[in-house]
Image (cartoon, rainbow, N blue to C red):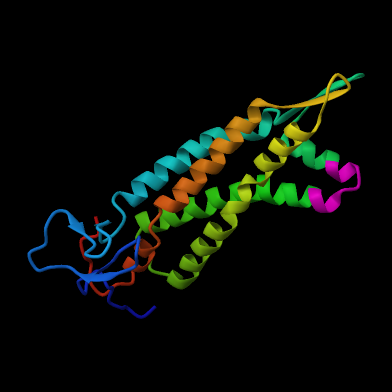
Amino acid sequence: MKAFDSAANAGFLRCPTCALVSRVPESRERDLRCGRCGHPLHVRKPRSIERTSALLVAACVLYPAANLLPIVHMRTVTSEADNTIMSGVVALADSGSWPLAALVFFASIFVPLLKLAVLGWLTLSIRLHWRWKLRERAALYRFVEFIGRWSMLDVFVDTFTVALVQLQPLMSVKPGPGVVFFAAVVVLTMLAAMSFDPRLIWDAGSTREGNHG
């Protein structure tokens, strides 16, 4: 890919709050702030890769518990049952609710795994200073950031189910411990996506290596 210069190397900074583009003064101070809203300005998000990596590791540690522990506990007059995310998907499919089963599988299993895999791969590519497929990698990050909001669907469904299905003593539904771990994984992956600075992808194609710390 043809090399190019970056706005950072040209001496420009963009405010993440109000989007004002400012020129870095020649006598650069340690703490630069936006002239319009006062938000701190950085050439790149401080310690972006370290923070993203730490959040991804934490999410990976919690992910097995989120899928193996029961996410809801249902009790009726005749029986009690615990359902994990996958068993809930299977139960929905067996009952004929294929669209809902597919939606829960996509939002609760596929999307978190996709975010973990893609963000991990993008972080690794920056650490290894890969220079290929810059445009495609940036587009992949935007896609993951867009679909990440659907990861909370399963938590919302459980919350509404617990609130609505309370026909005691005939039936009751309570959240299981898996909800806590799943919500934690969703939050951690969202924070990881927010901490990741996609501009670091393009730094590999810059004509000069600036100080982006």
From the viewer's side, name the closer residue of 37 and 15: 37
- Above or below for 35 versus 127: below
| Residue closest to the far left | 27
Which residue appears at 32% of the width and 78% of the height? 3
Q: Is residue 193 left or right of residue 166?
A: left
Which residue appears at 27% of the width and 73% of the height? 7
| Image quarter hosting the N terminus | bottom left
Q: Main secondary structure of the magenta part?
A: helix
Q: Is residue 60 left or right of residue 3?
A: right
Residue 135, image x and y in percent?
A: 46, 72
From the viewer's side, name the closer residue of 157 and 147: 157
| Image quarter hosting the C terminus | bottom left
Highlighted range, magenta: 92-100
Residue 147, image x and y in percent?
A: 59, 57
- Above or below for 151 versus 5: above
User: Which picture quadrant has residue 176?
Assistant: top right
- Above or below for 157 versus 136: above
Which residue appears at 32% of the width and 66% of the height? 203
Residue 22, image x and y in percent?
A: 23, 70
Q: Is residue 97 magenta?
A: yes
Q: Is residue 119 magenta?
A: no
